[in-house]
Image: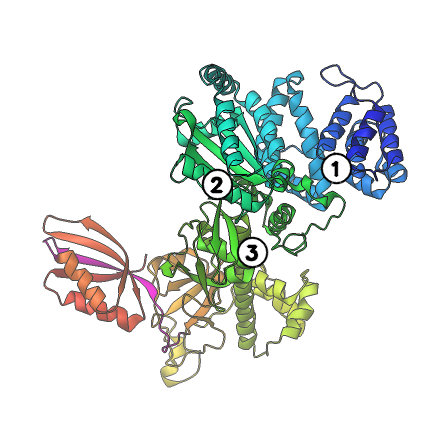
Amino acid sequence: MMRQYELVERVLKYDHTADEALLNRAYVYAMKAHGNQKRASGAPYFSHPLEVAAILTELKLDDATIATALLHDVIEDTDATRAEIDQMFGAEIGSLVDGLTKIKRLDLVSKKAEQAENFRKLLIAISTDIRVLLVKLADRLHNMRTLEHMKPESRQRNSEETLDIYAPLAGMMGMQALREELEDHAFRWLHPQAYEIVTEKLTELRQPNRGLVEEIRRAIALKCADAGIKAEATGREKKPYAIWRKMENKQISLEQLSDIYGFRVIVDTIEDCYRVLGIVHTTWSTVPGRFKDYISAPKRNNYQSIHTTVYGPRHQRVELQIRTHDMQHIAEYGIAAHALYKDRQYHANGRDADDDTDDSPYGRLRAMISSLLEAANPEEFLEHTKLELFHDQVFCFTPKGRLIALPRGATPLDFAYAVHTDVGNEAIAAYINGRHVPIDTHLRNGDEVVIETSKNHVRSAAWEAFAITGRARAAIRRAAREAERKRFVELGRQLVGSTLAGMEIDYSEEKIKTAAPKMGFKSADELLAAVGRNDVALPDILAAVVPQAGVGPVEEGYKPSRRFGRAQAQDGWFNIEKIQSLKFRTAEIDNTAAISIGGPSQELPVRFEPGGAVPGDRIVGVMAPGEGIRVFQIHSPRLKEYEEAHWIDATWDVDPEHPQRFPARISVTAVNEPGSLAEIAKIIGETGGNIDNIKMAKRAADFTVMYIELEVFDLVHLNHIIAGLRAKSSVAKVERLFE
């Protein structure tokens, strides 16, 4: 076990300004607090926080982080309190230890709902200070190194958490060496047979390939020296998990995997990187499609390097990484290579980490967490967030040359949201390299993307299927929820307004604002949205808006009055009102209390029932809880399924200058002969109709019945189509359907 002075010396070796007294106090306090506690291996418990601190000294972290590592388990596992930590070590270290304590209590492999909520808490905890994540990763690494002493179920749970959560987070932060070790430990315990097979095969291959790594390394170094380039060339065998994952992805055996050795050339300058690339490519044959330049287009975790694969000595495939010393430092230590732990405002390209457009790893982490917090629930965010941590990247450009890095498989919609949330919300079309493409087209490296926008566009929740990034999906859901809320507010406003108009009372927003608190709502819009969703009965809101009108709460059996154009009872010719069996429709209908139904793009939440309705039809609206209005044609047999208390008056409000299509259904009985379907489709097309769906049912040997779902402009248009079909000799019968 490392002694106290050894730990202090480790820190002072890279940080001469470190607070020795702080480190000594933390060492002694943690050792006394854990006392005689033992780990599962039988070793003193204090050896664990001490090893975590040692791992962090390898990352050259500051004294506060090292002290936090020593103390990270004291609140959870001893009698120590947060107040005591604050008093002895300061609020900063107290906050870090408290964040780590909260993380330790989370179960990230529980049932999906609990896992999602715990994942949310994890990200929130590490978003407050990146040092919380760094200590947690070191804590997890030491636990994985000693996992053989744990019970099988604990090994399984820890390995799943490591592979699903902590290793990807380490990769996101650019800490590649730490990520690889975490993955290998988890791989060993999650898939022991696969791990054993891979390691055995690697052992077998070492014998025939003895000296190969050194031969290739020496050949590369010699070529660089001949060109006058100062270079460090190293070679190594790839890790078992990396090999197994490549075998899984490519569905090949280890014998077929020719690039199990990786080589690295480290030089002084970026110019030397490209000079080495030229030497390698002119000396050996390149493998097509295996060149990536991450220097000009860094990865999202700020990783920079040139990757290429060539057929080197012995015609062996050689994977080569070329980078500078600074790039190598960042590749190994990631975000820990920066002074973030001393100055929590990390700067990349002149922007702060708190900026959601920041290209730094921590900035991206914070942006991801921000998206999570805006989600309706953590479950919908969990899966694609975990997947996004694994994604490779594509690099695309805006017309002005701005580089946008996205996960592989991203679409123009993801690109639009990466540029700006407003661009994504207003996107209606995309152009890739000047060519108009569908919004769900997969982007490729080097694509120039132009997004066409419209201020009047309302984002549909269905567009979420066209996006793969968490930021885009969260924004689409948020925009769809906001649009839906506005539609319900507008519907509620119309319902209340039309009801008040029927009572000859003027509608005003002030009345709604006054009524909202009385009914338990924070704002007028909240109340109106509840009315639109049918969560609040109209008589209840009327009682709050106009109590003097004497309208009480809704009672059982109450049915609101409806105006469907029935004649009002009046003394007149032949005392016609006394004839109870006769009811007449008036020529002039009072529509002051009717809800106006417009086109498909209207602001009200409206759904047309099967069979549809078109302008010119008499229509009835039915309030469906949480859905808005269902529109029925007055003769629809399905209308009788709903109580009249839920019916509302509805009238058409369409703009003849901007016609829109509406759904309708017809059945056509046609002669069963070649060309009859084509003739029917031709008539519908020539008259401006649009066939949305068609089903055929063979009634007899000589006749076929077709059920056709149409989109038409209005009743006149529909009747024109029906008349045109009836005029054909091949058509025996045409009927409109309402269900």
Which structural element holds mark 1?
A: loop
Q: CA distance from mark 1 to mark 3?
A: 39 Å
Which mark is drawn over residue 61? 1
Which structural element holds mark 2?
A: helix
The residue under the point 49% across, 34% down is 223
Q: Amino acid at mark 3?
A: Arg
Residue 110 in the image, given as x and y percentages of width and height:
60, 32
The residue where tag 2 is placed is 277
For the C terminus, give its image quadrant.
Answer: bottom left
| Magenta region, residue range | 654-675
The residue under the point 38% across, 61% down is 434
Q: Amino acid at mark 2?
A: Leu
Which mark is drawn over residue 478? 3
Seen from the viewer's position, the closer of residues 204 and 703 is 204
Residue 462 appears anywhere in the view = yes
Residue 299 appears anywhere in the view = no
Q: Amino acid at mark 1?
A: Leu
Residue 559 in the image, given as x and y percentages of width and height:
51, 64
Say whether disc 3 or disc 2 marks the residue closer to the N-terminus: 2
